[in-house]
Image (cartoon, rainbow, N blue to C red):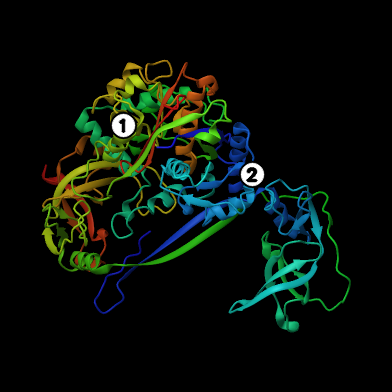
Amino acid sequence: MTDGLVTSIDEAQVLTTTLSMPYTLTTGPAAGSFLFELGNHRILGSRCEVCSRTVVPPSDYCSRCGEAPDEFVQLPETGTVTALTRTDRGVLALIRLDGADADLLHRLDLAKGAVTVGTRVRAVWAATATQSVLDLDCFVLDEDDQPPGTAHPAGEVGLIAQVPHQLELEYQHSYGPHYGRLFDELASSRRILGSLCPTCRNVLVPPREFCDACFVRTGQHVDVSDHGVLQAFSVIHLEFVGQTRTPPYIYAEIVLDGSATRLIHTVAGFDVATAAERLSIGMPVRAVWKDPADCRGTLNDIDYFEPVPSPDQQ
Amino acid sequence: MPAVAIVGVGQTHHSRRRKDVSQVGLAREAVTRALEDAGLTMADIDSVVVCTGPVLFAAVNQPEKWLVDAIGARLKPVVRVTSGGGTGLAGALAAVNQVRAGFADRVLVVAYDKLSEGALQYSISTLYDPFWGREFAVGIMGFSAAYWRARMDVLGHTEEAAALVSVKNHKNAMLNPYAHVRKEVSVEDVLSSRPLCWPIKLLDVPPISDGACAVILASESAAKACLDPAWIRGMAYYCEAENAAYRSMIQSEPLTLAASRVYQQAGITNPRRQCDVVEVQEPFTCFELSYYEGLGLCPPGGAAELVASGATELTGDIPVNPSGGCMGANPIGATALIRLAEIAQQVRGRAGAHQVPDARVGLMQAGGGWANLRGVAVVSSEKG
């Protein structure tokens, strides 16, 4: 989940992370039928008789009155541009299909001429169906000069109940002065820094601008030990999407000597199957560092914590 | 403080995966049921509070915008409130305050999540600091298990104590028509179930659910039209600094604070004797044990003894989670509001097969994280 980045005064001090989230979205009857019927080259809308409105794409509920619509209708493939914008990925337009009372957002292919508000356009279907709104490839100028079409009942419709979806979200988190120094020191000198609160005299790890309890400026960085005590632990067997380690492993919260806050890490160096017997709350542990060449300025520069004395000394 | 009452509640029949409705279609079902229960229509609603979990659960940002269309709430005040597992209660508190302030006479709170659609543990793990610990995060299960283990060491509690919570809540869920896990389990079953984050095992963990809940809150004058309002006698929601020095993980300070504030508002000095029924939001069984202590149903450290005594069973003197709690269904964004709806139904005498006889004063709790965000409410059939 965390890609890691060694910070440097000369470079932008950001941590780049990417969240890669898979979804299976449920369409509901209206959107699901719309997507299905695009594959049959049919554009569906929904008709609310209470409000006398036809909307496209169809909706499970009328956005005016909140009631379920009376029926699906099939709309003609022709309409009128009501608004448009030119983007670096082409022209996007709101299109009022003939017989509809609301606009459909889609793209225009301008290869065959200029478009403006009021221009008549017609749908062009994609060569291969992908069960998405892009089965309707785009709209182009309608040069046939036919009278506007009308909506009519759609009859039997199919349904795509679920669609896969993927979010790829990249973030650049600023380290700021405290985290920047913390991770630089971790990577370069195996030092762990905390902030001293001048009021409560607690040392807070990771270092921070303000004490969470006193809300006064901390100001001073102090070294804390890479030895500490195990405050809590669990044994992770659960596997899940996005996991960065392979189970089984230990989830541990450690209070480093000289600090008053918890550090989230793992305890290892022994057979995990014996963790329940071997580990206990309050037991001393110490950091086992990675080779300096492998340190990148993240918590992973500490490979793991091990019980003290280490298992092979016991 | 001006009186506020719950005058209608509705929830969906929760399930592991609803393939027939969209996210907002699901929420709409609960709204329809709450309006029917209250004998109202959307035209009677002055304001809407929408509650869902993190948007990463659903891949839809600003979901309230989508929901407005689905429930006919256009041109009404609509806000979304989110606060982890306690989201539904945080939303209810916002609604209560809208009524107390005179901003609205009737507020609809609608809470939902369709957890079948996204990557749950991954989404929850993003609540960790991206610099500091996220690479070790296992949703809230990793650290909850860790602090349960710490409680076991410090207080002498056992895995069996939490297993008793699982047995009780699974049994109660059999009586709840909205629950989707309806299967009795034994202590043996729980203890021998697959470890997920030991000491948390599969049967200590609620299901992943699609579900929604809606509650309508009304001012005293608006509640007069209602035959059996459930009066809000106290409600509070507190939070803790995530990484403060010497933070207690054995007891939740926000819970203690919220409980004492609410007891003061409701005139409760002995919750175990004065409350007839309790609903708590237990993301895992071990949470329910810590709540017993935080809510003052037993002394600190006394939770294992309390559950073993049978006092919190449906037939005990202080029944906890007669609905089955989260063990029956856990659509996270809706879960806290479901607890509030269930406790309202208890004091209205409408809880059905899991009704606690003659319940008049109900206590509910909800929150997020192991000890971070904690809310409490007391509802009563009496206005007070």
Q: Earlier in the sequence, mark 2 or mark 1?
A: 2
Mark 2 belongs to which amino acid? Ala
Left or right of residue A117, residue B292 in this image: left
Q: Which residue is mark 1?
A: B264
Is residue B371 or residue B90 the one in the foreground?
B90
Chain containing the residue with disc 2: B
**Discs 2 and 1 carry the same chain letter:** yes
The quadrant of the rendering that contains the N terminus of chain A is bottom left
| Residue B307 showing in the rendered view | no
Q: In the rendered view, would you say B185 is above or below B54?
A: above
Chain containing the residue with disc 1: B
At a point 41% along the width and 46% down the height, the residue shown is: B84
**Picture coordinates of residue A171, whole percent (x, y):** 40, 66
Q: Residue at the far right: name it.
A: A147
Q: In the rendered view, would you say B201 is above or below A72?
A: above
| Residue A150 showing in the rendered view | yes
Dot label at residue A190? none
User: Within 10 angstroms of label 1, few (less than 14), some, or many (20 or more) residues?
Assistant: few
**Picture coordinates of residue A65, whole percent (x, y):** 69, 49
Image quarter of residue B370? top left
Q: How many marks?
A: 2
**Picture coordinates of residue B153, whole percent (x, y):** 21, 32
Which secondary structure, mark 1?
helix
Image quarter of residue B186? top left
At a point 12% along the width and 46% down the height, the residue shown is: A308
Is residue B9 or residue A135 the one in the foreground?
B9
Q: Residue at the far bottom: name it.
A: A113
Is residue B204 or residue A241 the one in the foreground?
B204
At a point 51% along the width and 57% down the height, the residue shown is: B61
Mark 1 belongs to which amino acid? Gln
Label 2, label 1: how far apart the Cα atoms are:
36 Å
Q: Which residue is mark 2?
A: B43
